[in-house]
Image (spheres, rainbow, N blue to C red):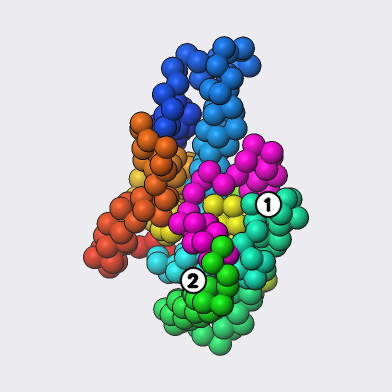
Amino acid sequence: MRFVYIGLGTLALFVVALMTGAVDIPATEVLGILMGKDTENTVWRVIVLESRLPMAMTALLSGASLSIAGLMLQTTFQNPLAGPSILGVSSGASMGVAIVMLLGGGALASAGALQYVSVIAGAIAGAATVILLLLGLSSSLRSSAMLLIAGIMLSYLASSVISLLNFFAPADGVKSFVVWGLGSFGGVTASELPLFCTVLAAALFSSALFIKPLNALLLGERYTANMGYSVKRLRSLLLCLSGILTAFVTAFCGPIGFIGIVVPHIARMIFKTSNHSILIPATMLCGAALTLACSVLTTIPGSSGVLPINAITPVIGVPVIIYILIQRRSLRYFN
């Protein structure tokens, strides 16, 4: 029944996201537009189909993707505070985007499809760089706490590179990157939505193929090896998949904080299990619901302004992380 309640809640939030915005559009008109009916106000049709629907779909898939990436990283490193942002994967993706945007003069909006492809490639390359460094360090750093610290250091290093690029970049490039870095689910246009949905849906489906290996990792590396899995290869695949999910979301939406860390814990607390056959779909649903809620909160009714998504996520994320730190002795996720 928990799946039913969360699924209905996610659907309700998706509908609310389509109904709310700076422009007041009657609910009957929104439903009619979505069903393909004609409307006298063509502006409403453009707002619903070109803005609200892509934004809601982007929020839904981004939340599910970042949450699954966080779940896989937490299980891989046996650490409840592991996540795309903490381990430096998000910072690496941001560094890749910064290289493209800042060295390219910030001409993202006017350069066409080639520039968007460059941003995606930059994000994936930046995330891959951090992942490869983590893989190299994981062979020598057996302690998950030490590897977590190494990830934080890599995050600081990527932030340093971004700061240097900001210092030497032209003003228009810095402005474009700062706006991108605030985070927004409105960066995916209707024409880009099929690509965005296809890639993330394929990656999310791939994550479901790792249910048994992830459950084996809960019992330790020796048990995983006895089950016939190569721990090193498995860790590499999980890190790569997490990196793709994080990099693709970061390229289009900016570095979204806290979602990847807190949602897996919310799913564990709701379903009271560490079994990934339950956790993976539960985490997807919880992540989609949470990001849709954040997306709705970013919209200011009666105003043309939209709050940055990273102004909302810490309000939810910080209390959960503090709770995890306080209750760390009673949280037995990884045994």
Residue 201 placement (x, y as % from top left): 64, 44
On whether residue 41 falls in the magenta region, the answer is no
In the rendered image, the quadrant that contains the N terminus is top left
Name the N-terminal-most of marks 1 and 2.
Answer: 2
In the rendered image, the quadrant that contains the C terminus is bottom left
On whether residue 176 falls in the magenta region, the answer is yes
- The residue shown at (45%, 57%) is 182
- The residue shown at (60%, 68%) is 102
Residue 100 placement (x, y as % from top left): 65, 66
- Specify start and end residues of the magenta stretch as a single range: 173-202
Residue behind mark 1: 110
The circle on residue 87 is 2
Residue 223 visible in the snapshot = no
- The residue shown at (61%, 12%) is 37
Q: Dot 2, crowdedness within 10 Å: few (<14), some or many (≥20)?
A: many
Residue 113 placement (x, y as % from top left): 74, 50
Q: Quadrant of residue 10?
A: top left
Depth check: 239 or 39 in front?
Answer: 39
Under circle 2, the secondary element is loop
Q: Disc 1 vs disc 2: Cβ atoms closer than 8 Å? A: no
Depth check: 3 or 166 in front?
Answer: 166
- The residue shown at (53%, 73%) is 166
Depth check: 2 or 157 in front?
Answer: 157
Under circle 1, the secondary element is helix
Residue 127 placement (x, y as % from top left): 61, 68
Q: In which quarter of the image is residue 16?
A: top left
User: Looking at numbered disc 1 in the image, what kind of residue is underneath it?
Assistant: Ser
Query: Up-down: is 25 above or below 227?
Result: above
User: Looking at numbered disc 2 in the image, what kind of residue is underneath it?
Assistant: Leu
Q: Which of marks 1 and 2 is in front?
A: 1
Query: Up-down: is 212 above or below 281?
Result: below
Secondary structure, magenta segment, majority class:
helix
